[in-house]
Amino acid sequence: MNNAQETYNDVIEQNPLDSVEEVLSDNNWIYSRMNDDELLVDVAGSVFGYRICFVWQEHMNALQIVCQLDCTVKKQNHSLAAEALMEINRTTWMGHFEFTKTRFSPCFRYTCLVQDRENANKVYTNIQDVVDICLTQCEQYQNVFQILSSDVPLDMQILSLAMMETEGES
């Protein structure tokens, strides 16, 4: 074995969940590391709380992030919710929204490949970006999910207004 191969083989590739822990700590978020491959954190949003689950799959070099909103779509709104989700996902560049089977709660799902794990700074920055993307996507559509969780009579026209991209805040 030559010197370059020995150096490469000696490189320790860290578990990306270690970098996730650093990102969460830097945000002062309290998390639970379930095991070597799974981590949970609860984060407050502007309307809903978010439960974010990070799952590391080493054999695929993939980190899956699932960000579940703390709301439940009303049964009478399920078909409108499905239409709204199709429209939202059509315009979402990274990741997608879906509903959980048990509670019919919206969640944002994103999977990223984690290459070059020996470069801790690069992994940290990528994870920080992914967490920002997840929370930004959830915040962008939280009004839609809030409406779908209410008892207000709805139609697709009302939801279309809630899905419009806006500038600034009121």
Image: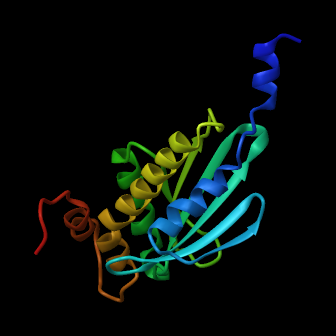
User: Residue at horizontal 37%, vertical 47%?
Assistant: 92
Q: Position of residue 29 (x, y in %)?
A: 50, 75
Q: Quadrant of the N terminus?
A: top right
Question: Is 74 displayed left or right of 14 in the figure?
Answer: left
Question: Is 152 displayed left or right of 105 in the figure?
Answer: left
User: Residue at horizontal 30%, vertical 63%?
Assistant: 140
Q: Quadrant of the C terminus?
A: bottom left
11, 133: nearer the viewer: 11
Q: Position of residue 17 (x, y in %)?
A: 65, 56
User: Residue at horizontal 41%, vertical 50%?
Assistant: 89
116 w.r.t. 80: above or below: above
The quarter holding residue 4 reads: top right
Q: Position of residue 127 (x, y in %)?
A: 51, 50
Residue lying at the far bottom of the rendered structure: 151
165, 56: nearer the viewer: 56
17, 153: nearer the viewer: 17
Q: Position of residue 134 (x, y in %)?
A: 44, 58
Q: How many marks?
A: 0
